[in-house]
């Protein structure tokens, strides 16, 4: 699923084909469960949906939530106080499966990417009040649209990465501004995928992943057979073999590459 383009009919057929052959098909996305279900119909040929970058795993057939992870109250309070000292704009997303709901810091008109996100999801957000921090959460999302956003990521990663999984992502709304997502150490697309791998008794060489953004780095590093789409961020295209662009049925192209290499 791309930022502005749902999976094509050709990609859907490829999912159906490989799933029929016995493969376990999984989509791992940064989208919440609610946002994922807006672009994936209930009959989509899928076994599992990893949503909110690993905060939840849904059995697609039964629609049962089979795994979730999140921040506890002490972790939430710690991150909230830390980010407050940095004067950053952020949201606190509630625990899966309700990770589309969030609390947010005051609107900052100088941060257009932040205000755009709050307005875009206006029905799901509430102003953050210190005395009413949520007891649990799936993640924090820091939004930085300044020219120094990469330095913000480096600073937060250096300060927090021993206790939390700090992930860089590109905004799905404007495609340029930086999101910094802060998860528990046990939450990632890679760890959620490994949970499913073990559930089905598979080995790492039997795993395949297709990515497009910085938040896929851990997943691509985990997978035995990683590929990236042709319009992935430049860093990923330098690090991994690329197939066609997302809008050119990238998954279908990736599947052909994997089948040829397996043969």
Image (cartoon, grey):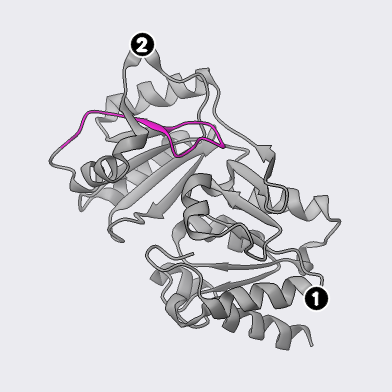
**Can you say whether 135 is above or below 60 in the image?**
above
240 relative to 123 in the view: left or right: right
Element on which disc 2 rests: helix
Q: Is residue 30 visible?
A: no
Whether 74 is drawn above or below 94: the answer is above
Magenta stretch: helix, strand or loop mostly: loop
Task: Find the distance from the CA under tag 2 to the CA under tag 1.
Answer: 53 Å
Taking the spot 54% from the left edge, 60% from the top edge, the residue there is 40
Looking at the image, the residue that sits furthest to the top is 131
Q: Position of residue 213 (x, y in %)?
A: 45, 62
* Residue 98 part of the magenta-drawn span: yes
Q: Quadrant of residue 68?
A: top right
Q: Which residue is mark 1?
A: 21
**Percent of width and height locating residue 143:** 30, 43
Image depth: mark 2 or mark 1 in front:
1
Q: Residue at x 49, y 75 (%)?
A: 229
Residue lying furthest left in this view?
110
Question: Relative to 6, is 143 on the left or the right?
Answer: left
Q: Position of residue 66 (x, y in %)?
A: 72, 41
What residue does disc 2 label?
131
């Amino acid at each position: 699923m791309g930022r502005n383009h749902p999976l094509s009919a050709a990609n859907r057929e490829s999912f159906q084909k490989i799933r029929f052959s016995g493969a376990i098909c999984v989509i791992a996305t940064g989208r919440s469960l609610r946002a994922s279900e807006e672009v994936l119909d209930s009959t989509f040929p899928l076994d599992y949906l990893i949503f909110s970058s690993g905060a939840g795993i849904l059995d697609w057939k039964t629609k049962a939530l089979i795994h979730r992870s999140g921040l506890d109250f002490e972790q939430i309070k710690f991150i909230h106080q830390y980010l407050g000292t940095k004067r950053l704009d952020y949201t606190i997303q509630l625990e899966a499966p309700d990770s589309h709901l969030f609390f947010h810091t005051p609107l900052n008109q100088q941060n257009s990417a932040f205000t755009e996100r709050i307005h875009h999801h206006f029905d799901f957000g509430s102003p953050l009040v210190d005395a009413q921090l949520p007891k649990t959460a799936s993640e924090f999302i820091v939004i930085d649209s300044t020219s120094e956003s990469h330095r913000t990521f480096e600073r937060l990663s250096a300060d927090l990465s021993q206790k939390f999984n700090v992930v860089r992502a590109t905004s799905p709304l404007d495609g340029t501004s930086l999101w910094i997502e802060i998860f528990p150490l046990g939450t990632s697309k890679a760890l959620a995928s490994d949970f499913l791998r073990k559930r089905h008794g598979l080995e790492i060489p039997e795993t395949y992943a297709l990515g497009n953004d910085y938040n896929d780095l851990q997943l691509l590093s985990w997978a035995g057979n990683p590929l990236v789409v042709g319009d992935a961020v430049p860093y990923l295209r330098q690090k991994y073999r690329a197939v066609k662009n997302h809008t050119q049925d990238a998954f279908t192209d990736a599947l052909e590459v994997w089948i040829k290499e397996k043969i």
